[in-house]
Image: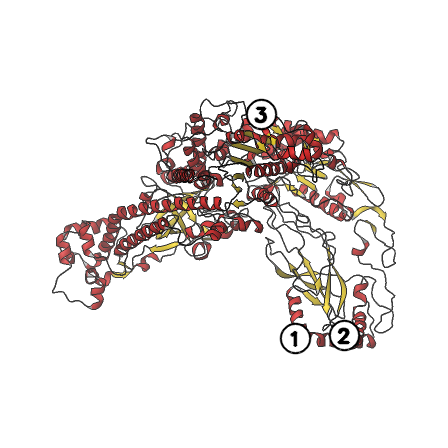
Amino acid sequence: MANRDEWIQLSATRDEIVRSNIFVKLEDGDGWKSKPEIPTAKEILLLQKEAEGLPENDVRQPWKSKEDYLKAQYEILRREGTEGLRFAVNNYIYNNNHGLRQDDDQHMFVYTQVRIKSYIMTTLGPLARVEFMPQRAIKWLKSGRLKPGSLLALTTKADKFKTICKVAVVAQRPYLLGLDQTPPLVDLMWGNPEDAVFDCDLELVMIEAQHGYFESSRHSLVGLQLAAQADTPIDKYITGSHRKNETPRFIYQSPIMDFSSVVRQPLADLEKLKSLREFNVLSGLLLKDVESISFLDASQLSALHRMVSKELAIIQGPPGTGKTFTSVEAIKVMLASRRKRPGHNPPLIVAAQTNHALDQLLGHCLEANAKILRLGSRSEREDMRPYSLYEMRRKCSRGGGGKRFRELEDDRHTNIDRVEALVNSVFGDSLIDPRQLHAHGIITEAQLESLYDDEMETSPELEKLGPFSLWLGDSRIPARIVRDRQPLISETLEADEDFDYERDVENIAYDEEDADRINGKEIKLMHIWTGKEPGHFKSWNHRAQRLLRENDNLFDIPQDWRGAVYQHLQSKLVQATTPTLAGLLAKYVEICKQRRALKARQDIDMAFSQDIAVIGCTTTGLTKYRAFLAGLQPNTLLIEEAAETREGNITSALYPSLQQLILVGDHAQMSPRCDIRWLGQHPYNLNVSLFERLINLKMNHIMLNQQRRMRPELRRIVSPFYNNLLDHPSVQSPQARPDVPGMGGRNCWFFDHEWIERTNSDNSKLNDQEAEMITLFFVYLVSNVDSYQGEENDVVLLSLVRSPDPVYGRNIGFLDNPHRAVVAISRARQGFYIFGNVNNLLEAKTESSFLWGLIFNRFADQGMVNRELGLPLVCQNHGNEIWIKELEDWADNTGGCHERCRETRPCGHPCTLRCHATAHENLPCSSPCFQIVPECGHPCHGLCGERCFHDCERFRQAKASVKQAQRQGTDSPKGKTIESLLLQHGAHDFGHEEPVKRKSIVSTGSPGRGLYSHFGELPLRPIGDNWKNAEAVIQQQDRKLDEELAERNEKWLSQTHHVQDQWMPTGVTASGTRIRAGPIITQTLQLLSDLPAMTTTAAVTAGSGSHLRTGSGAGPIFAPTLNQFPNIAPIAQPELLIQLEQDDYAVSATNMKQTIGDLENDGEEDWLIDFEEPE
């Protein structure tokens, strides 16, 4: 426990750290350390030649100095954030200079008729609300345009970037009362308050780049400037020149750590347990004999020891080796040791590239009973919400925020009042006050006096509007008449199908905990009155100025020109007051920064008061929340997915207090994303992570070497990319990794073809025949899945797509990227099947030939390819082998072979079908039914798979009594209530005379997305005895219930009826054609005793269409949530569902959550990966 003096010193230090991270001191001059956070107009207007001269980022050798290293990282990262907009603006200027159309193109979006409507005075800062017109109608909820954080350039309609360029950032894009309006509205934050525009009549043009996203690098850029102002113990490793890995100072001072969490419990050897609880990490490696009592393997133990004892730990985790698991065990050790360490014990900072990985890591920390705090509100897990910064503030809030906070709020509101007063003097309900024009030198003394002639007649209305009212006369008109001229826009709706606004967009306020910052008082910029323009002149401004110069008496100006002169005076007054307004906004920004600093300081105190042990955020959040995190003065930073994280994101997060950096990832699988392709390549290398660079420079690192995911034959496919990767005993067990059914022990295969690809309207590459082959193969696998005992999504089908006509040359697109290739071939657990053109892969270019040659040879070495015969299938019933080479070979394939089934059905009839994989219970029997119908005693006239009936009067009378009983049962209040609830969930009675043809269903799908529940219809076929004797069973139960009710004094009873619904035989091809049997669902309904004759059933499915490119629509068959009704309970889970959308070539199995775009999340498998070429 720190004494009072130490506490005061700590507090003062934290204050200084927070302020230095919010009020960043820039150097004088034009160097990289002098550049402001938001790019300047000068940067955006640079011509191509002027933009050259970037420093190189040589990843092959150490840096000579930290200064050179930071400068290169900063300049290249800043160029990536601005290059898209710079190129777009230059493209706009070029088109204008050459008389070309200024339309949207592949580089830019152009917005015209942009006007400032108001300013929103938020605690984030002042936001300019602007209206604009896109060049076509936009589906804003599905569009990636104007994302918060996007960089924009604005100019006037007349200037077109010749001399005027104002840079702004999208602050927020509200849909309701924003983008849904005509014209749409969006909120911007000016890069420089001096650029603020206040003239609501000034027409602007706004440019947005189609490529690059400034927000992804914005905070890192500031962090790199701050990194140049202070040194850390990690700096010597970052340059790549320091090889000796040292022990952090705080660990050297207190080296006793608790490793007891890594052993299997309980441990009988108490002496050994004690030694693990008090292990000195300076005494050497973790004892070798610990491996025999630990659930960690030798490589994991070595990695863990380095993670908790060295200043820099680099841990490579190949697929399935448990790198996240090892990180969690290291965190447990550090937390157990933290509690025993004396003095200042700041939280451990953990970060990951994606929100999914961060949630996974923090979830494990929760399981270890750690007190956690999650920064950012992008978590998809409900159990993370209580641990957000917003919730911590809410729980710890004492109201008011303290004296200093109230003082800042007073200052802020005073500033708002000043802005509002000045704006109202320019944009008020009345006309302009002539005295204001005179005070700014816009009109002369004589002109002012001419408006105040005592002999002029006036009225209360004229006096209210001011002297200009009489002068204007009929030339005074409402300003909205001038503004409300709506342009025509294209009726073609534009949407970005890859963009999910609700998932991907964050405001600049970003987070739930800062939601109040994006709201504030709105100060509107709007003239109520203006002057009428002279109708016979297109350009009148110069004439208006001349008339004003030539007439000391304003009443000498002709009446039909006074409206134009008045508009000119309005514009001049706005120009005159703009510097004052801009100064007030700058002062307001300063107050908001002080408020931010105070908030961060309060958050730090709350974190320590709540004894937060682990704080987690994304790697972007490391610099976004830098003031808060640096103020905590953490010792340790652990980064998951470090190989996917940009080097600048990590370097910019090396706070001065850090003594320990732990990097966990796998550079063979993923690399950082670079928005500007040429900056990702040599010599700039933005797509090379710090993780990969240090390993390539031979920096000490540990590779985990026991994989627990793939069968051995699948591991052999990836082994060329990992030296000494071993199989854990668990994956060698046939029980844990059974063979894929229907494949005869061939659990991997490379299907070679030469089907030619095509290009769609989006310039994406598609291969229809390959997709059809994969779809039919998938249907075959699903039909055999009943006997499959493995986990879900254990089989991967990989579509390579690329197969151009050899006449035009070989091309494989991004398939030559080794990172993507390793990801694709390492997802499967039990089965992996590739479909592609081998000749194209091996002949496209040298790089791809080497890469795919390694992969293809691993299939060939194991005998898992036959380029002549195609794809082998093996019948599970008879052991016959069937080869599939062309699409036609799938004709009439039912999952078996060509022999007859000849097995006996559950009903007793022999099966007359050809060999099939589907269980007989799921196939309706078409043999004649000769059972006696209980209602009438006559033989059944139907088929075995249909409900029994006989066309006679006795049967019809029995049916009528059943319907009467149903009406009586559902007429009770309770009956009506339950019936209504059941019907809401798709339940319908099946008391029909004829076999049921259709039933209403509940679906999780809406066309195209699969996100919302709705009602639909599904063709059904009645099967089995459950349908036959329904009426008889109901009648019998009715009589039985009457007797039991009398005997038991009308106590509540329930009766269960089992009803089975099945899809008509159906499946899906790539073109949407239904071809094969689909899934079934069985539902049990327990009916209360006051509904003795009502039999109901609910059929559910996963919906009428699903777009799987982002995986958002994929999912299992949906069972209705009827848990609140204790009389209803499901008795069986549904099987697999095939979902496919044309052009996507993606299919779904139960619980599939992602396709190739989401494969960055290590450890989650898919049934099919779509290797479609991007735009």
Up-down: is 396 above or below 981? above
Q: Amino acid at mark 1?
A: Pro
Residue 338 x %, y %: 55, 37
> In which quadrant of the rendered view does residue 978 lie?
bottom right
The mark nearer the N terminus, 1 or 3, is 3
Say whether residue 1156 is left or right of residue 533. right
The mark nearer the N terminus, 2 or 1, is 2
Which of the labelled discs sits on residue 700, or is there none?
3
Q: Amino acid at mark 3?
A: Asn
User: Which residue does the numbered mark 1 point to in the structure image?
Assistant: 973
Looking at the picture, tell me which residue is in the foreground, 167 or 255.
255
Name the residue: 37% across, 44% down. 593
Residue 1120 x %, y %: 66, 60
Q: Amino acid at mark 2?
A: Val
Up-down: is 318 above or below 1119? above
Q: Marks 3 and 2, how far apart in space?
A: 80 Å
Dot 3 and dot 2 residues touching (CB under 8 Å): no
Residue 261 x %, y %: 64, 38
SS at badge 1: helix
Looking at the picture, tell me which residue is in the foreground, 692 or 1061.
692
Which of the labelled discs sits on residue 962, or is there none?
2
SS at badge 2: helix
Name the residue: 63% across, 53% down. 1105
Q: Give the crowd class for mark 2: few <14, some 14-19, many >=20 residues within 10 Å.
A: many
Q: Give the crowd class for mark 1: few <14, some 14-19, many >=20 residues within 10 Å.
A: few
Name the residue: 30% across, 54% down. 417
